[in-house]
Image: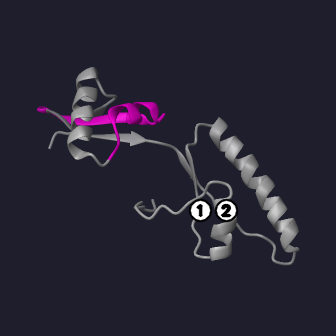
Amino acid sequence: MNLELRPPTEQDLKNLGECLERDGQHGSLEEWKESGAELITFYDEQGPVFHIALQRGLRIFLQHDQGRDLDTRKAAMTEAIQWLKGQAKDKGIKELIFESTIKPVIGFFSQFGFNASPNEQKVKL
């Protein structure tokens, strides 16, 4: 297959809009265009084959000092997460991600807008 890629042309955007309408699972063309993501069209000699939207995300790993009192750790993590959210947003990062199975940690971070995302798939590079 002779597949190439490009920023979407007006015709590609029309195709993307039609694909999104038929699919009904991935939002509207306006949502894609307003997402701030980089849009790319993969095409062959017959035209667009598929489209992707690339957003920058940041995976974070957290480790606190269990020897410090809980209130201090919570206050420090609150300040650090608020700082990190601001820094990431300023750099065009659209999402912060962390993994945890520890219910108190998950509950604590929910106050900053973190929520479960069970439909995502990932691959380590």
Q: Residue at x 22, y 31 (%)?
A: 15
Residue 29 included in the magenta stretch of the image: yes
Q: Residues within 10 Å of mark 1 (few under 14, many from 20)?
A: some
Q: Residue at x 86, y 78 (%)?
A: 67
87, 119: nearer the viewer? 119
Q: On screen, 42 above or below 7?
A: below
Residue of label 2: 109
Q: CA distance from mark 2 to mark 1?
A: 10 Å
Q: Does 65 sit left or right of 48 as displayed?
A: right
Q: Residues within 10 Å of mark 2 (few under 14, many from 20)?
A: some
Q: Which mark is residue 64?
A: none
Residue of label 1: 98
Q: On screen, 124 above or below 84?
A: below
**What is the number of callouts on the image?**
2
Amino acid at dot 2: Phe
Residue situated furthest top in the rendering: 10
Which segment is the magenta one?
26-46
Q: Quadrant of the N terminus?
A: top left
Pointer 2 and pointer 1: residues touching (CB < 8 Å)?
yes
Residue 59 occupies quadrant: bottom right
- Mark 2 or 1, nearer chain start: 1
Q: Position of residue 48 (x, y in %)?
A: 20, 34
Instruction: Between label 2 and label 1, give the one nearer the viewer.
Output: 2
Residue 43 included in the magenta stretch of the image: yes
Q: Does 85 sit left or right of 71 as displayed?
A: left
Q: Residue at x 81, y 73 (%)?
A: 65
Coloration mode: one colour
Residue 37 occupies quadrant: top left
Q: Does 103 sit left or right of 56 as displayed?
A: right
